[in-house]
Image (cartoon, helix red, strand yellow):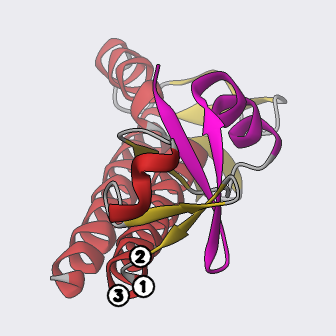
């Protein structure tokens, strides 16, 4: 059976796998660490812990602090990644006052419409606010290019952030 400890300040509570999963569902920020075993023979410390009256206590505070720093760094990375994903999801550009979605998922529709249109032709298009507007081939080309640029910018910002973390 897998056993976990729930970190609470400088002390830890032993949990089985089911209870650990339930705790994480209730508290997404809860930090769980798997331990080798949890019985009275843990006095030497499994993975740097010792058992005192059913509560696992850290023997090596620096190791726990280092683990917390790693987890904090991972949380920041996930936050930056989510920012990048949100930028990619929104992908709305404004062309001649018209809000046109130019997300990665819209790229194929934009390209197909552009390829099927003559230079000065216009067509009905569903705008970002779900209203129907009239757009020209030139406007769709501009929306596509700006959307691609937004996507690249989102990746560049994330890459720069990652490089600055090293």
Q: Secondary structure at mark 3?
A: helix
Question: In this figure, which residue is indicated by the disc labeled 2?
Answer: 64
Question: In this figure, which residue is indicated by the disc labeled 3?
Answer: 62
Q: Would you say 76 lies left or right of 132 here?
A: left
Q: Name the disc covering residue 61, or none.
A: 1
Is 163 inside the magenta-drawn segment? no
Q: Secondary structure at mark 2?
A: helix
Crowd class of label 2 (few under 14; some 14 to 19; many from 20; radius 10 Å):
some
Q: Residue at x 60, y 48 (%)?
A: 90
Mark 2 and mark 1 residues within 8 Å of each other at the beta carbon: yes
Task: For marks 1 and 3, give the CA distance.
Answer: 4 Å
Q: How many marks?
A: 3
Of 103 and 140, nearer the camera is 103
Q: Which stretch did the figure color magenta? A: 1-26
Q: Position of residue 12 (x, y in %)?
A: 63, 62
Q: Position of residue 113 (x, y in %)?
A: 42, 18
Q: Residue at x 35, y 40 (%)?
A: 36
Q: Position of residue 86 (x, y in %)?
A: 57, 52
Crowd class of label 3 (few under 14; some 14 to 19; many from 20; radius 10 Å):
few
Crowd class of label 1 (few under 14; some 14 to 19; many from 20; radius 10 Å):
few
């Amino acid at each position: 059976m897998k056993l976990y400890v729930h970190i609470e300040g400088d002390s830890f509570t032993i949990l089985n796998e089911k209870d650990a999963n339930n705790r994480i569902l209730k508290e997404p920020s809860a930090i769980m660490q798997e331990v080798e075993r949890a019985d009275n023979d843990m006095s030497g410390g499994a993975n740097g812990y010792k058992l005192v009256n059913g509560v696992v206590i850290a023997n090596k505070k620096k190791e726990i602090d280092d683990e917390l720093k790693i987890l904090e760094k991972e949380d920041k990375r996930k936050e930056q990644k989510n920012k990048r994903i949100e930028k990619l999801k929104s992908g709305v550009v404004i062309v001649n006052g018209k809000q046109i979605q130019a997300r990665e998922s819209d790229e194929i529709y934009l390209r197909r419409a552009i390829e099927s249109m003559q230079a000065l032709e216009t067509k009905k298009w569903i705008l970002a606010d779900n209203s129907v507007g009239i757009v020209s081939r030139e406007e769709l080309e501009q929306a596509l290019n700006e959307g691609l640029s937004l996507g690249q910018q989102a990746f560049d910002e994330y890459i720069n952030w990652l490089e600055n973390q090293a």
